[in-house]
Image (cartoon, rainbow, N blue to C red):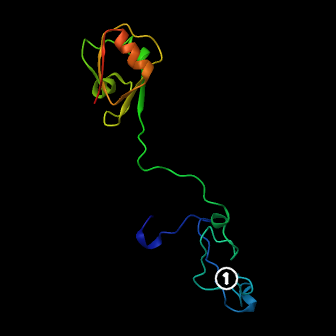
Amino acid sequence: MLKMNNLKPAPGSHRETKRLGRGTASGQGKTGGHGSNGDKARSGAYQKFYFEGGQTPLTRRIPKVGFHSPFKKEYQIVNVGALEDVDLGGTDVTAETLRKLGLIHEAGKPVKILGTGELTKALVFRVNAYSKSAKDKIEKAKGKAEVV
C-alpha cells in the first residue's frame, strides 16, 4: 500500500553523490578530482567564456572598422507602379494610407516615392521625399507631389 512513510524512488533512478576528498582510498582523495593546482583547482574557480589564458583576447587583436551615423534617415520606399493597381478611392496618398494598403510597415517612419513603374492616376502625394523620376511621373499624370 502506498503511504508517505514508504515512498522510494524508482530502482536505478537515484545515484549516490560522489564524496570527494575523503582520503586516498576513496579513489577521489587528495585533489578531489580537480587535478594538480591551476586555476580550475581553486575553490570558486570560474573563467569568463572569452578568457584566453592571459593572451591578448581576439576582440582586442582585431582592428576597429566602420561607422554608423546616429543621424541617418532610413526611408521606407514605395514605387509609383505599386499604386497603379491599388484602389485608393480618390484619397490623398499619405504614410497612413500606404500603411493601410500594406505597402509600408510603419506609418511613423519617413517614406520616399521612387519612379519604377507607370502611373496614370492623378493622385496627391503627401510624403517625406521623392526621386526625380517619381516626381516627373506624378506631375505627368496630373497629380501633385507635396513634401511633408
| Residue shown at the point (34%, 13%) measured from the top left | 139
Q: Quadrant of the C terminus?
A: top left
* Location of residue 74 by image quarter: top left
Q: Secondary structure at mark 1?
A: helix
Task: State how many labels appear.
Answer: 1
Please state if 118 lies on the left or on the right of 59 as rendered. Answer: left
Q: Quadrant of the N terminus?
A: bottom left
Residue 16, above or below 32: above
The amino acid on which the numbered mark 1 sits, given as a three-letter code, is Asp
> Is 80 in front, or is 18?
80
| Residue shown at the point (41%, 47%) measured from the top left | 71
> Is 88 in front, or is 14?
88
Residue 33, above or below 121: below
* Location of residue 29 by image quarter: bottom right
Residue 113, above or below 9: above
* Location of residue 41 by image quarter: bottom right
The image position of residue 83, as x and y in percent, is 38, 15
The image position of residue 46, as x and y in percent, is 59, 77
| Residue shown at the point (31%, 33%) measured from the top left | 107
The residue sitting at the top extreme is: 120
Please state if 41 lies on the left or on the right of 139 as rendered. Answer: right
Q: Which residue is mark 1?
A: 39
> Is 87 in front, or is 44?
87
The image position of residue 125, as x and y in percent, is 30, 21
Q: Residues within 10 Å of mark 1 (few under 14, many from 20)?
A: few
The image position of residue 37, as x and y in percent, is 72, 87
Please state if 38 lies on the left or on the right of 65 as rendered. Answer: right
